Amino acid sequence: MAKTAVVTGAGSGIGRAVAQALLRDGYRVALAGRRADALEETADGSPDALVGPTDVSDEDSVAALFGTVRERWGRLDLLVNNAGISAGGTVADLSVEDWKRTVDVNLTGMFLCAREAVRLMRDQEPRGGRIVNNGSISAHAPRPASVAYTATKHAVTGLTRSISLDGRAWNVACGQIDIGNAATEMTERMAAGIPQADGRILAEPTFDVRHVADAVLYMAGLPLDANVQFLTITATTMPFIGRG
């Protein structure tokens, strides 16, 4: 029987690359995101793709997505918790509205999706499944003017650890992938230069997003008695290791 997956943020970037890699690998994949047209582009006519427009920050919307997965396929083997946004701003100038919106999507959204996934994995036969949370290099070190994004990504690490521990009772494995400068629409601006911690504006290298998809496939392909707890994949020469 084909394995089933939910990928959030599947309408573009990393989510699209991961979802399409899973489809090529034989998964049935529920594509979650805000824009149905973008999800249809990701699906590209695949009969194994389920387009599910979803607001991950809304409890009812998330419950409806996973309810459809339960009704359509009867089980869930993998959640790739990928959806996220970035609101730029320093601690001195970020608005409360932008702070709350970032927390709602990046943290509460991941919790809501994980909760529904674990409930489904707990109740199905055979029991169990896997969750892969998209952290970020910002789960380790911040960029300038990224207080909300960085805070949520540090929190995702705590969420990953807690799910991993709680999930043991139901054979649910949970790991995190921390990605730095994968080439997507969001990182195109890096070629023109972005602010560094020392105040300079520098261009940064990127790497092909397909390598992120390959890494997620590796994590997903392990048996449930083995787990990649944390995996970091970056452009080799990006300003992450060492001091600038």
Image (spheres, rainbow, N blue to C red):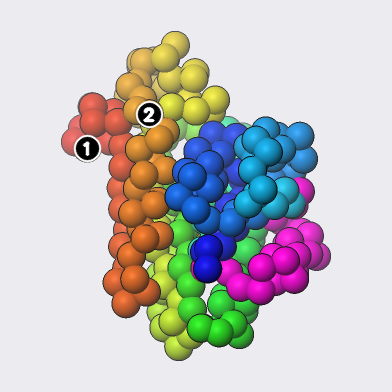
Near mark 1 (Cα within 10 A), the count class, few <14, some 14-19 or many ≥20, is few
Q: Residue at x 53, y 28 (%)?
A: 186
Residue sitting nearer the eye, 3 or 197: 3
Which label belongs to residue 196? none
Residue type pointed to by label 2: Asp
Q: Position of residue 14 (x, y in %)?
A: 50, 39
Q: Position of residue 32 (x, y in %)?
A: 67, 50
Q: Which residue is mark 1?
A: 241
Q: Position of residue 99 (x, y in %)?
A: 65, 46
Residue type pointed to by label 1: Ile
Residue 67 appears anywhere in the view: yes
Q: Residue at x 40, y 51 (%)?
A: 216
Disc 1 is placed on an element classified as loop
Q: Which residue is mark 2?
A: 208
Q: Quadrant of residue 6?
A: bottom right
Q: Position of residue 120 (x, y in %)?
A: 62, 77
Residue sitting nearer the eye, 13 or 52: 52
Q: Does 171 lie within the magenta span? A: no
Residue range of the region highlighted in magenta in the rendering: 53-77
